[in-house]
Amino acid sequence: MYIALLHYHLLRGGVSSVIRHQAALLKQAGYQVLIITGEAPSDLLDIPAAIVPLLAYDSVRAESEASLSETPEALAQGIRDAMQSHWGRVADVLHVHNPLLRKNKLLLPALELLQKGGVNLLLHNHDFAEDFRPDVYNTSQNYPENCHFGVINRRDYSFLHRSGLKKEGLHFLPNAVLPLQASRGLERRRFVYPVRAIRRKNIGEALFLSLFIPKGTSIAITLPPAQTSSDLRCYQFWKQVAVELSLPVEFEVGLRESIADIMGTAQAVLTTSVQEGFGFAFLEPWTVDVAVLGRRIGTVCSDFERDGLQFPYLYDSIDIPMAYLSPPLLRKKLEHILAELYGAYNLELETHTLKTLTDNIFSQEVFDFGKLDEEFQMDIIEMAASNSIARQDIIDINPFLQTLATWDMAAHEDLIQTNKELVALHYSMEHALNQLQMAYTRVTSTPVQHRISKSVLLDLFLDPLKLYPVGITHMGSPLAISRLRNQSASEAGN
């Protein structure tokens, strides 16, 4: 069988890693494999790759001086030519990764043209713009119809099914988990957060947790955002806060040390992210005998728990007493964010939606730290760092923090071993290959007639009670933070 894997780029990142692993698996299993991408890979591949410049992000093409015919027809022809040039034919399955995100305005109409020309499509979705990512939402383009779709978690499977897709054209394709490596003989002195520190990774919460870890340990964040990322200013802000408050937090350790050495110094792996598609951070650490602590994301952890994994060291929220917040200001901020969010989706924010949010705020005596914006998070961190009474109040209603303060990895060896075995059983390369093979067989043998209702899908994702300001990709909170910090500095000097 001939399989073409298609993506905008192969730069370092989660989706690119999945594509590389899939390509290697398929090649080893005897498939004819070609990767089609918009940019040259950063390193040499053992898998044949074809570069189609029109497939790159719109932002990348805008910076290019090349003269390109910017039409869907030209992109479709470029993809077809790549397959014809390599094989002398088109693929049995064109396996497209993350096509529903608005990263390339030409891609969806180009895929429609290829489909009309007889190409079988499998649209593999790792992320959804409807999931609080309005900056990449296709407001003017419909999603492809009558083709097969893949997802990486059961929530997304349910949402697409409820939005109109038939089960025979919908495939659950969880990622494979490759064992990590850890250097031996190093001092276990870190709680490692192995992440590129973009906003939705909730870096403020990692700083907050640093107030409760055992003395002599640190929280180590591995990588900064990309230099071109809009997350960079927020990241620099948190670095500044860590310095000002003398917090035991290390930044960018992945730029100085190998991942094997970093994992070799880990007492545990920490995650505070508020939004994940698959959730490698909940699985990979067990492969090197390291437990996972931190924020539980139900949409992904529930899949792993169905396979028997246990996560007793995760919390659903960090509850902050309302006495340490300003409920009217909190309501005003969240209502403003929600209104801006709905506007970005070209939706009208209805009164009952606002009432749901307001009632939730004023019916509680506590509020989740992760649902605060960066300014509120900063205030809580500063207060907890300087006020022992407030810090104890927070510990009293969040027992996990006491667990963190007395953490000893040696006491959890049995669970670590059990979870390690379950990860190897359910998320192996062989299991992932089997899932792909079943999907390809259905793509080539089972025509489907269905379509996604975009309005239904958007309604399923946009739950106001799941609003995490740090998880909304286009919001400008870091600018407000910058103004606040500058104002504080000015007042301190007067």
Image (cartoon, grey):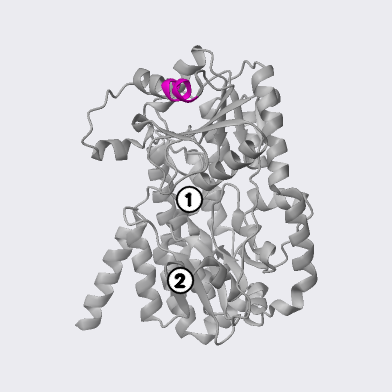
| Circle 1 crowding by C-alpha within 10 Å: few under 14, some 14–19, many from 20 | few
- Of residues 462 and 2, the one drawn nearer to the viewer in this rendering: 2
The three-letter amino acid code for the residue at tag 1 is Gly
Structural distance between the alpha carbons of marks 1 and 2: 17 Å
Instruction: Identify the amino acid type marked 2.
Output: Val
Tell me the residue that label 2 is attached to.
253
Where does the image place residue 330, in percent across and percent down from the top left? Answer: 44, 60
In the rendered image, the quadrant that contains the N terminus is top right
Tally of numbered discs: 2
In the depicted structure, whether residue 99 falls above or below residue 153 = above
Q: Residues within 10 Å of mark 2 (few under 14, many from 20)?
A: some
Q: In the rendered image, is residue 380 in sight?
A: yes
The one of 117 and 241 positioned closer to us in this rendering: 117
Q: Secondary structure at mark 2?
A: helix
| Res 326 seen here | no
The span shown in magenta is: 80-86
Residue 428 at x, y = what percent? 71, 49
Query: Percent position (x, y) of residue 321?
Result: 55, 70
Q: Is residue 285 left or right of residue 81?
A: right
| Residue name at image x 39 percent, y 65 percent | 375
Label 1 close to label 2 by CB (< 8 Å): no
- The image quadrant that residue 311 belongs to is bottom right
Q: Residue at x 73, y 55 (%)?
A: 423
Residue carrying label 1: 13
Nearer to me, 454 or 429: 429
- In the image as oriented, which residue stretches furthest toward the top? 117
262 above or below 18?
below
Quadrant for the C terminus, please. Answer: bottom left
Which is more N-terminal, label 2 or label 1?
1
Taking 54 as reference, is 467 above or below it? below
